[in-house]
Image: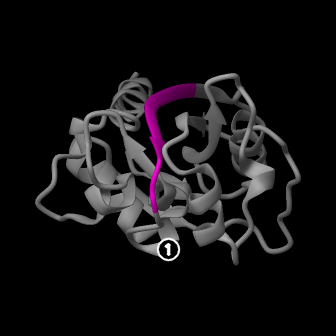
Amino acid sequence: MTAYFVDGTELRAGEIRRAVPALRFELAALPAGYSTSAPDPERKARDMVLAVDDHFPCFAEAVDLLTKEGQSLRLELDSENDNRFCRWWRETPVRLVMCLAVRRDRAAEVEVFHGVCEGRIADRPAGPRELGWDRLFVPEGFDATYAELVADPDGDPGAVGLRTGPYQALAAALAR
C-alpha cells in the first residue's frame, strides 16, 4: 500500500526513506486554499490530514522548537530573521518536537506519533532552507545542524533519532 506524505518535501522524503525503507509513500500537496493557525505541532499535523479528502492513507508532520521550560520559539522566528534568531538564542538548550499525524481513510480517526530531540540553537542557520527549523537546531552530540545531517545523502538519519521512531511506528500501523 502506498501512503501520501502531505506537504512533504523531496529532502524530507529522502531522509524518511533512508530511515524506514519499508515505508512506501508519495508526496501530495495540501488542498488549494488550506490554511491553519494552529499553535502547536500536533494540531497543525492533524489539521493537514483532515484537510485531505482524496489521498488515503495520508500522513503529515509538523514541528516546533521549545525551550527547556516549554516555551515555543515559533513566534520568535519569521522567514527573514533566522540569522538574528540564531544570534539572539544561540547555544540555548532546546528540544525539537515533531508530531506525525496519519489518517487511513476519510472516516478514520487521526492517529498521532511523537518524536523529541534534545539539542541547542545553532550559532548560525545552516543547511537547505526548505528544512525549516532543522537549519537552526544542533542535536545533542553533534556539531552540525539537523538540516546539514539530513541533507547529507550518505548520512545516517537514524543517528539523530527524531523521525526514525515515529516513522517506524507509522509503517507498522499502516501494515496492520
Density class for disc 1 (Cα within 10 Å; few <14, some 14-19, many ≥20) is few
Residue bounds of the magenta highlight: 113-123
Residue at 24% across, 46% down: 157
* Image quadrant in which you'd find residue 68: top right
Residue designated by label 1: 129
Residue 16, image x, y percentages? 33, 49
Residue 43, image x, y percentages? 78, 37
Residue 118, image x, y percentages? 44, 30
* Image quadrant in which you'd find residue 7: bottom right
| Dominant SS in magenta | strand
Instruction: Say above or below: 68 vs 14.
Output: above
Viewer-nearest residue: 75 or 50: 75
Residue at 30% across, 54% down: 15
Q: Is residue 45 visible?
A: yes
Residue at 61% across, 50% down: 89
Considering the image in quadrants, where does the N terminus appear?
top left
Helix, strand or loop status at disc 1? helix
Viewer-nearest residue: 57 or 163: 163
Left or right: where 89 falls relative to 22: right
